[in-house]
Every structure is written in structure tokens, then in C-alpha cells.
Image: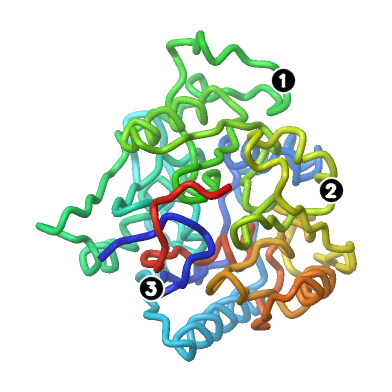
Amino acid sequence: MINSHTSFGKLKEVVVGRELSLTKRLSDITFKQFYKSAINESVYESPFDSYHVNMDLIDKRNEQLNDLAKTLEDKGIVVHRPDTLNKIVPFTTPSFKSELSSASNVRDVTWVYCNKLIETPTYVRNRYYENTLLYNVYNKVWDKGRGGQWIRCPQTDLSEEKMDLEHWGDTRDYSNVPANYTMAIDGAQFLRIGKDVIVNVNSYNQYLGYEWVKSFFPETNFHMISVADNHIDGCIISLRPGVFLVNPIYTNIRDVMPEKFKNWTYLYPEDLTVNLDVTGMTDIDIRLASSRGMDVNILSIDESTVVVNKRAYGVKDILSKNGFDIIEVELDNGEIFAGGIHCSTLDLVREDEFISYK
């Protein structure tokens, strides 16, 4: 039965992603805009529409994802895996052409909340049909006849003129959204805390996607903030009632949080991560996320136990000092693959409640 209201209730069932087993990666305008603050300007302005990742690196990533899945299974958690993608699958929509992406960062294109599984409207074109690799899982867990819902987003138009390409920090009038924009928001923009959901919104596209998702949950208190260009789970994660783990670059994040959560404890790990050297990993110098964001991208097993990257030294240190039990795993090169442990997992069932936390 699909059931998840928080990021910290006792985890019972989860999906662990699989990395694309091909070296080619697409980098069209939607890709470059989505990762604009992470990639350097020369890459953003380049005419290249693809790049390549070292195959040894891909194999290592998949081995580590397999190890992550086994670690969770050893804790008694039911683990599901998407289908493997090891060939180029081109596709065409009325507005663009692309090639299918692997279901690696499964947190992004699906949002699970309460008893609903929602396929969210992606911003990046090659992820348009990514969820089809997860249909083997969804068919197993969908609660037909038991009140659960599986909801797919409308077919969106990801042509360039439909995308809000202005800087994420620019002021926008969300009460008067231009009619030409299409909805586009990832599941990783939603931070679930029982009856409250905090959502990172930074474009007209994301605002429309946020409003669409919100329409399914009339009893939930949604709080819209704008804190980063990318996903909220690289900025802040709720560890248990009263405690957040925060990316140390967001020193003022408390100021933009909903009033009821400003008195929670905000844990800022010391930045002890060594900068990533991408030499030989890719054929262009590209990073899609920060090391700090990947370090705080953890997965809670329950309110006292967290799965943390072995090399996230600052995160491990501060969590240990605050009474959390740590399960170490290796999931390297999140900056290259745009995903840490939280991004690479999607919790389907947690033992938690639809209540208001204070």
C-alpha cells in the first residue's frame, strides 16, 4: 500500500535507481537551463548538444547503486528497481526530439505523498518518458481498489518558447503567469513534513507544476519558497520533527522558511568535502551539482537512522554529535550524475502519519 507523509517515518518500501548504461548524455537547452548555476558559462554557451561520461565511471555508479539496494534490503526494507536502459531509444513529440534517459534519480520525476503516486511534469526533455522504466514497479504497488491513486501529468510542450529561461532569482509575478508557459516541476522540489509541504519554486514553469500538484491535496498546507535554482533536497532535508539538515552554503535559509518551522534546529555540517576532479570522467568539464548538496542528500530510515555517503565527513560528524545512527554507503560522483542518495531513491511506504508537526 502506497503510504508516505514525511521523509523520516520508518521506511518500509523504496525504489533504488539504475544509471544509464551508455556513455552519451544529452545537453539541450532544457538541460543547460536546469543546471545553469552548476555548469560553467562556456558549457552553457557551447553549441554542443551532448557529451560523454567515462564507461568505467558508469559501471562503478551502477555497482554502488546495487550495493545501496542491498544495504537497504539487509535492513528489512523492500527494494524495487527500474528496468535497465542499455541502448539508445530515440523519441519524438510534436514539439521536440530526444533520447530516453535512464531512471537513475528516481526522486525527480515521481512524487509520492499520502497514498498518491504522481508522475511529475519534467523540465528536461530527455526525461519525458523516463517513468516508463518504472512502470514495472508502479504496477506492483498501485493500490487498485484500496484508495491509492496513480496520477500521470498532462503531456507538456517543452519547446523553448514555452520555458521560463530567466535567472531563477529574478522577481516574478505568480499572480499573473504569462499564458504561453507550460508546467514543469520535479518531485525533488517537495519537502514533506506531514500535513505541511515546503516547495522550492523558481520559475513560471515550476509555479504551474506546483499548482497542479497542489490541487490533489486540499487538506495539506503548502508553503512556496524560492531558495535555489535546483532541487530543494540539495539544500535542506527534514531528519525528524524539529530538526533539519542544511547545505552549509545556505546560511540564511531559516529566513525564507515558513514561520512555524523557523524555531526548528538547523544543522549545518562543516564543509569537509574534497573538490571533485573530473579529469578523465567526462569529455567536457561538467558538474551538475555541488559536493555540499550531494553530501546533505541523505536518506532517513527512521527518525534516528540515516544513510550517508561514506565520504560526507562533515555530515557524518554533525549527525553523530546530534544522536543519529549512521549507515555508511559509497555513492561517488554525484556531481557528475546529478544525484546523491536521496535523489537515487524514492520511498513508497513509510510508517508515518498525516499530522501537523510543530
Q: Amino acid at mark 3?
A: Glu
| Dot 3 or dot 1, earlier in sequence | 3
Please, what secondary structure does the residue beneath circle 2 have?
Answer: loop
Distance between mark 2 and mark 3 Cα atoms: 32 Å
| Residue 23, quarter of picture | bottom right
Q: Is the residue under label 1 in contact with that under label 3 (CB below 8 Å)? A: no
For residue 165, say whether it is visible: yes
Q: Which residue shows up at 29% across the image and 62% down it?
A: 2
Instruction: Tell me the tag on residue 337.
Output: none
Image location (x, y in percent) of residue 186: 49, 44
Disc 1 crowd, CA 10 A, few/some/many (<14, 14-19, 20+):
few
Which quadrant is home to the N terminus? bottom left
Q: Which residue is mark 2?
A: 249
Distance between mark 1 and mark 2 Cα atoms: 20 Å
Q: Is the residue under label 2 in contact with that under label 1 (CB below 8 Å)? A: no
For residue 286, say whether it is visible: no
